[in-house]
Amino acid sequence: MAFGQQSGPPASSRQLQELLALIQGAGHRDFRDARGPMGFTQRQAGGRFTRDEADDYIQRLQSGDSDESRMAGGDSWRESAREQLLGHLPADDLAGELRRRGWMVIEPLTP
């Protein structure tokens, strides 16, 4: 088997639609957006799953075992680029951007 190729029959379109709906329900736009948090390979991020892989992810997401760090094989150190960026922004800058976009920001009480 060549590098990066599937090791089984491809997932059906019904499986892919169901998996995409569950992933979107977990807060991701698409397979590529969920790649890091879900532990997808590059092939899977492109929407190419085997039947067994799709069934496994569907079962995990439906059973409530959607803790993404467990699904990624324990790689809890992995964060999306967005989470890394937001973690380094000063709170004042983040609050200013939220206000600019029409959100209301409540400042925390200082002791």
Image (tube, rainbow, N blue to C red):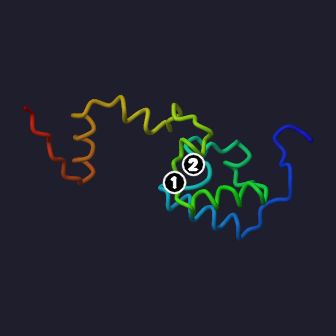
Q: Nearer the viewer, residue 97 or 39?
A: 39
Q: Residue furthest right?
A: 1
Left or right of 106: which side holds 62? Answer: right
Residue 76 position (above or below residue 61):
above
Picture residue at 56% right of the left edge, 48% below the top: 33
Residue identifier under label 2 = 34
Q: Within 10 angstroms of label 1, few (less than 14), some, or many (20 or more) residues? A: some
Looking at the rendered structure, the secondary structure element under dot 2 is: loop
Q: Nearer the viewer, residue 29 or 62?
A: 62
Picture residue at 53% right of the left edge, 46% below the top: 68
Left or right of 27: which side holds 41? Answer: right
Image quadrant assignment for residue 70: top right
Q: Quadrant of the C terminus?
A: top left
Looking at the rendered structure, the secondary structure element under dot 1 is: loop
Give the percent coordinates (x, y) of residue 98. 26, 46
Please, what is the three-letter code of the amino acid marked with disc 2? Ala
Q: Quadrant of the N terminus?
A: top right
